[in-house]
Amino acid sequence: MPRLRNKVAIVTGGARGMGAATARLFVAEGARVVIADVLDQEGAALAAELGADARYRHLDITDETAWQRLVAETVNDLGQIDILINNAAILLFRTLLETEKAEFERVLQVNVLGAFLGIKSVAPSMIARGKGAIVNISSVDGMKSANGLGAYSSSKWAVRGLTRTAALELGHKGIRVNSVHPGGVNTWMSNPDKLSRDIIDKSYPNVPLQRIGEPEEIARVSLFLASDEASYVCGAEVAVDGGMLTGSYYQALPGAPGI
């Protein structure tokens, strides 16, 4: 039996990358999926590809009115909302001293405010039905950081904290809220030049699995957390990072003992 049979899901940032992989997998597993994004051409094309169980809707996740409109439309058309995947995000590579105030604010607006508004807008309909699952896509940089990622890391730490608070406030109302923390993933964000796997994997020599992740590998974890199989999982933080957070793997120098 499909794992999301009879469920309705909203996936933000669903037009490409991890969001598109999630939408594809969810439809394959029986869900009806609302692909929400600002990339209208890509989103519409994906919805057409996926057929009757997918639809694209333009959504600026920083706009509360737009969120309310999307939720009302989804409930009116599809009858319910079972799953929210807060996936949409932006990345900024800039040192703290180089980062402009407006840039920092923009990252927080999209990555944090967008997730907050998603939870706030979708939760009432889930509460009314006494059940639901929300998955917030954070990052390994919500558990650590790196130079040049001050704004992004700050936002992803905030998403992690937001997830915990939402789990506390909504769990007893039947809504499970969890976060996923991807490492490097082979999307336009981590691989904007579309380098081959042979080349891009060389950028991950210290990660235990020594390779970049694929969007489908993140989507499968979101699928588990969104499904009834995760019925007792709430407030969890799941790293999907090839082992990155365990530490750095260093190969022995020539002539030194191997490990």
Image: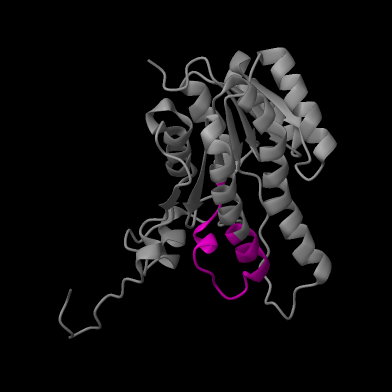
Q: Position of residue 112 (x, y in %)?
A: 68, 53
**Rendered location of residue 10, percent (x, y):** 63, 30
* Image position, residue 43 (x, y; %): 69, 32
Residue drawn at the location 54% of the way across and 44% of the way down: 168
Left or right for 157, reference 215? right
Q: For the point 65% across and 45% down, which residue is it?
A: 88
Residue 141 located within the stretch drawn in magenta: yes
Q: How many marks can you see?
A: 0
> In front: 84, or 53?
84
For the record, the magenta segment spans 137-157
Question: From this viewpoint, is residue 14 visible?
Answer: yes
Q: Residue at x 76, y 20 (%)?
A: 73
Quarter of the image with the N terminus is top left
The one nearer the camera, 213 or 162, is 162
Task: Note whether 81 is above or below 197 in the view shown.
Answer: above
Picture quadrant of residue 66: top right
Q: Is residue 140 left or right of residue 161?
A: left
| Residue placed furthest toward the left | 257
Q: Is residue 150 magenta?
A: yes
